[in-house]
Each structure stands twice: as C-alpha cells, then as structure tokens.
Amino acid sequence: MFDRVLIANRGEIALRLIAACRDLGIGTVAVYSTADRESLHVRHADEAVCIGGPHSSQSYLNIPAIISAAEVTDVDAIHPGYGFLAEDARFAEICQACGIHFIGPTPDAIRLMGDKARARRAAEDAGIPVLPGSRQPLRSVSAVRDCALEVGFPVILKASKGGGGRGMRIARGMDDLEEAFNQAQSEAGAAFGSGELYLERFVEHPRHIEFQVLGDRYGNVVSLGERECSIQRRHQKLLEEAPANHFSADRRTEVNELLARALGSIGYSNAGTAEFVMDQSGDLHFIELNARIQVEHPVTEAVTGIDLVRSQMLLASGESLDDVIPGPTDVRGHAIECRINAEDPQTFLPSAGRITQFAAPGGCGIRVDSAAYAGWRVRPYYDSLVAKIVASAGCRRQAIQRMRRALGMSVLEGIQTSIPLHLRILDDPAFIEGRYDTGFLDAFLAPESG
C-alpha cells in the first residue's frame, strides 16, 4: 500500500480523497492555487504545496508544477480526482516515467476512451451495443453526408476528442447537415484542439443510464449497477439516482455481466463509468466510457456499501478485485444526489462570492460532500459545484422525502444556489413517478421562459 498520495485536485473531491487516504492510513499532500490558499483540502492534508496562480492552466493543469510537488514531497502516487488531469493520458504517462503510481486506468486505456470514435469501435468489437454510426472520424461534409444517408436522420455529430456537451450538434435533415458539421468542428477544435468528429443516429427523448465499473490489473472487472442521470441541462448533470427508475434486477444483472466480460477482454483497470442512452423501446446504446471516478459516485456507494475511492487506492496498489470486494455487490435501497451549484436557479448564471453562512443538513440517510464553509469565497475560475447532498433510504419514495428534508434544512447564504430548483424538481409529478428523460428540465423550465 502507498505511504503518501498527492491529491491533484481541489474542492469536495479533494476532501473525499483525503478521507479515503486517512481510512487507509495513507499520508496526503494537497496542491493548491493562490486562489485556494484558504480551502479546506489545504487545511486537512498532511502537507500542502502551492503550484501556481488562480487559473487552472497556471495550477491544476500545470503538469510540471504538480510533478515537482510530488517529487519534493516524496509521494508514492497521485490521485487526479475528476476533471482537470483525470483523463489526460500524457499526465498518466509522465507519472509512470517519474516512478509515481497514477491512481486510475492505464495511459493506453485513458487514450482509447478519450478518443470517443475509437472507444465506440472498441465497445462494438467487444459486444457492447452501440448506435448506428461512423466507425472512423469524419473530416469533410461529403463524408458526413454519406454516413448520414446510411444511418438515417436525425443524427448527432460529436467531437472525437471531447465531452461535456461541447462539439455536439444535431441534424434532423440534409439541409441542417453542413451547418451542424461546421459548428461542431469549430467548437471541437477550440475546446479540444481537434476538429475530428464522428456521427451517430440521434435518439429522441432518451434516458441517460450509466454503469459503474471497477477492474484490477489481472483482467478482472466488476460492474456495480446503474445510475439514472437523465435530469441534466445542456448535457450537464444536475441530479442522479441509483438504481435507475423502472430498471429490473434481471436487466441489471445482464448488463453487469456483459460489461464485466467486455471490459475484462480489453484489460480495463481501476474505476470507470460506461455511459448509455436508452431509447423509448428500452434498448441501451453505449455512448462513452469515462476513465475516472465520477462526480456522482456517492449514489453507487450508498446502494452497494462499497467505498469506490478506497477501492481505487487498493486496486492501484496491486490488490486483486476479489480482495478489494470480497462480498456481494447487490444493489440495496435507493439513493439520490443533488448537485448544489453556485448559480442563479432561474438563469443558471454563475454566482461567485463569499459564503456568509453555511450549515450542512444531517439526520438519518443524509450525506454531504462539500468543501464550503462560512467565510469561504466561491471563485469564478472553477466549476460552480459547491456541495453534493445525497439522500438514501430503503425505497425511492423515502429517499425523495429525505432529500426534501435535507434541502429544506440546508443553510447556504451569500451566494445564489440551485437548491430552490432542486426542491421544485422533487415536487414535480413526473419526477415523483420516475418517468422522465433528458428533455425533462427543458420542458420543466419552459413556462418560465415563455
């Protein structure tokens, strides 16, 4: 097991990683930007190193500064969390070259999954169902036209090297295709440094279902069930649940076994999330695999009892999956996570500023992951996530009620947050019935915009 781990991240995920290390008796080193000097992850780590200015490019994306901090503090391993360098294959390779363990998938796996077009081909070859689409990147309008005619409209163009909703455009007919291609290619080039695109048939009113996986170095992979992530705005998730609504235990077992075989065959290791869209017929179609821990991992932890971050540490140190998870992995009960963002709940504009009061909710079945405190300043340089509130119970109805209670008892003043929006969603009849898709939020907010 590692003696010291450097946490190459900030905010709530940095605190989450520090907590897991403490449970394992591992020392921790935090890195921070000048803007984060007063942050909790700096206070709670055993040692902290300033690595640059407030902008991510000066600090949390500054590979030389992070590696220098790791070497100066003599750590065994680096955990990247999510975002920033978590899916940067070059960073993982540099860690290896410097004799530092990278707590995550191998550089080859990160590179494969980071190229969405290649990942799609690999999934298809491994027997995972994918949507009809291109098997190679498309670099011209004529190639896109030929592929669209073969696949059938509507289609969606996606950035091969990207994610997060950027570099994506829908075309519902041939007249839309050239403009969609030009816009997607331009946005992809600006965001990811590559204008390569691939094309898939677009699913109308899909649900977004994802499966948590863990793998060891010895070819063993386990899938720990699914999460429902369909409540999202512009492809950014706002609320997640586990298990997914109206998803049978037999179906879960079937997909779990398929993913374990398929990802084991390609040697996938450590944590990952296989993301799918579900069409209105109930068929699942693979869209991507995120080669890292996810923001929403706590809902899977709540329904399985498995500490995913602790598992990452153990798997990266060379332990086998059987030793890391010796017991059953059945899904029990229900969990809901609300992402509390520092933004206007009506306009979604960011709300930076100083938090004047903060009191996290408690009580049975409530977990809060946050780096916020009274007096802490939410900076404009980073993601707007301030806290994650997770409610778990024996059934979905009770989990919803507990989440209502937790949100109502939350005190977070000085900035605007998404809490009022979450409370409204929890009272919506369609949400209560568990019958919604990725278009839920647009329809939910439409009357206000009209």
Image (cartoon, rainbow, N blue to C red):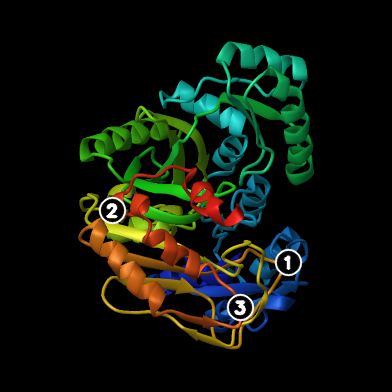
Residue closer to the observer: 403 or 209 = 403
Q: Secondary structure at mark 3?
A: loop
Residue drawn at x 31%, y 61% as measured from the top left:
302
The residue that disc 3 covers is: 415
Q: Give the answer, above or below, for where 364 lies relative to 296.
A: below
Give the crowd class for mark 2: few <14, some 14-19, many >=20 residues within 10 Å: some
Quadrant assignment, res 380: bottom right
Choose between 327 and 166: the one closer to the eye: 166
State the residue in front, 399 or 386.
Answer: 399
Q: Which residue is mark 1?
A: 59
As measured in the structure, the alpha-carbon distance from the residue carrying label 3 to the one carrying label 2 is 41 Å
- Residue 298 is at least partly visible in this image: no
Q: Position of residue 121 (x, y in %)?
A: 54, 24
* Horizontal and vertical percent position of residue 18: 48, 72
In this rendering, the label closer to the viewer, 1 or 2: 1
Q: Is residue 43 left or right of residue 229?
A: right
Is residue 391 in view? Answer: yes
Q: Which of the two discs, 1 and 3, sits closer to the camera?
A: 3
Binning the other alpha carbons within 10 Å of mark 1 as few (below 14), some (14 to 19) or many (20 upward) gives many
Kind of element beneath mark 1: loop
Q: Quadrant of the N terminus?
A: bottom left
> Are the two marked residues, 3 and 2, in contact with CB atoms closer than 8 angstroms?
no
Residue 407 vs 149, above or below: the answer is below
Cα distance in 3D space between marks 1 and 3: 25 Å
At label 1, the amino acid type is Ser
Per the image, the residue denoted by label 2 is: 325
The residue at the point 69 percent across, 29 percent down is 197
Point out the tag, 1 or 2, that comes first from the N-terminus.
1
The kind of residue tagged 3 is Ile
Q: Secondary structure at mark 2?
A: loop
Query: Which residue does the image show at 59% across and 58% down from the upper left?
Result: 100
CA distance separating discs 1 and 2? 35 Å
